[in-house]
Image: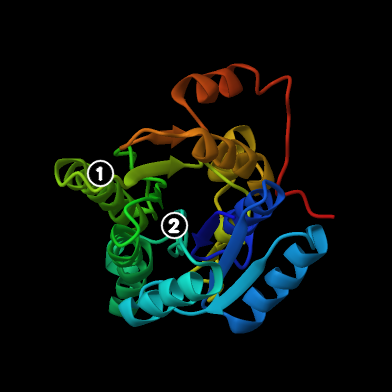
Amino acid sequence: MKTVVITGSGRGLGLEMAKLFLQNGWAVVLNDINAQRVEEAKSELEAVSAAYKVYAFAGNAASYTDLKALAQYAVESCGQIDIWINNAGVNQPMEPIWMLSEQEISTLVDVDLKGAVLGSKVAMETMLAMKQGAIYNLEGYGSNDAMMLGLNMYGTTKRAVTHFTQALAKESEEKQTGILVGRLSPGIMITDFTVKALGDQEAIDLPEKTKKVYNILGDYPDVVAAFLVKEMLANTKNNAHIEWLTGGKAAWRFMTAAFNKRDFFKKA
């Protein structure tokens, strides 16, 4: 049985991807910094399919020590790691850089960038012993150089993640490790991440203009996860870029927005 490890999978996209891997017969190792949340996610997955194994590990995805412990737990529980996804991330308060505190900046850099770097390091260290595996890092707003007021630091970390992942893929190829490295680009997803900053610490008051764009381009995480998991399971190429919201798809949505009205923020 193959095994996937997904950081930040106590909810949102990470949890939805975990469900689909499970349904495809994979063992799943969940991870979240919140111990209660990751155990609740484990119970939810076990209700989806009791035929396959689900494991839960509470730990900080920005801590090398915790990530090493996560990898060890996965290997001890499942025997190997076939895919490792660095999915954990936090959003920023919708403020310009000079209004963010030093701690807020540190949190964004630690979780959104350092977590991907250290997670990739740990995954590579673990997979090298097995001479196989695939590592995927999550892109986000800013990965394609897009800029917007209130997303400077988040966008900076994601632009760096893109460079890092492409460089890691090149390193893996040149060193002939046999380990695939790729990027997942999920587009705009409507989750708690959209409306809460720094891992639930602060509510984000989205401008109406931003809500309008999100209503046109956004999707719920289960929709995005179905595409991403299908592509990961089929992928055999290093430096793969698995992109949900392509330029063509985004253009089509804007052109047809008048006929396909959606309101993800409508209050019940």
Amino acid type, callout 1: Ala
Q: Earlier in the sequence, mark 2 or mark 1?
A: 2
The residue lying toward the viewer, choosing from 93 and 143, is 143
Q: Is residue 127 left or right of residue 37?
A: left
The residue lying toward the viewer, choosing from 93 and 162, is 162
Q: Is residue 193 left or right of residue 36?
A: left
Please identify the quarter of the rendering in which residue 39 is found. bottom right
Amino acid type, callout 2: Trp
Q: Residue 123 location, x and y as percent?
A: 35, 62
Identify the secondary structure beneath mark 2: strand
Q: In the rendered image, which residue does mark 1 sit on?
A: 169
| Picture layout, residue 259 above or below residue 162 | above
Is residue 205 among the parts visible in the rendering? no
Please identify the quarter of the rendering in which residue 22 is found. bottom right
Alpha carbon of mark 2 to alpha carbon of mark 1: how far?
A: 14 Å
Q: Residue 87 location, x and y as percent?
A: 47, 58
| Picture layout, residue 77 above or below residue 213 | below
Q: Residue 158 location, x and y as percent?
A: 33, 51
Q: Which mark is residue 34?
A: none
Q: Residue 36 location, x and y as percent?
A: 66, 82
Q: Residue at 35% x, 65% y: name it.
A: 119
Q: Quadrant of the N terminus?
A: bottom right
Is residue 166 among the parts visible in the rendering? yes
The residue lying toward the viewer, choosing from 225 and 23, is 23
Q: Residue at 65% x, 18% y: name it.
A: 256
Q: Which mark is residue 84?
A: 2
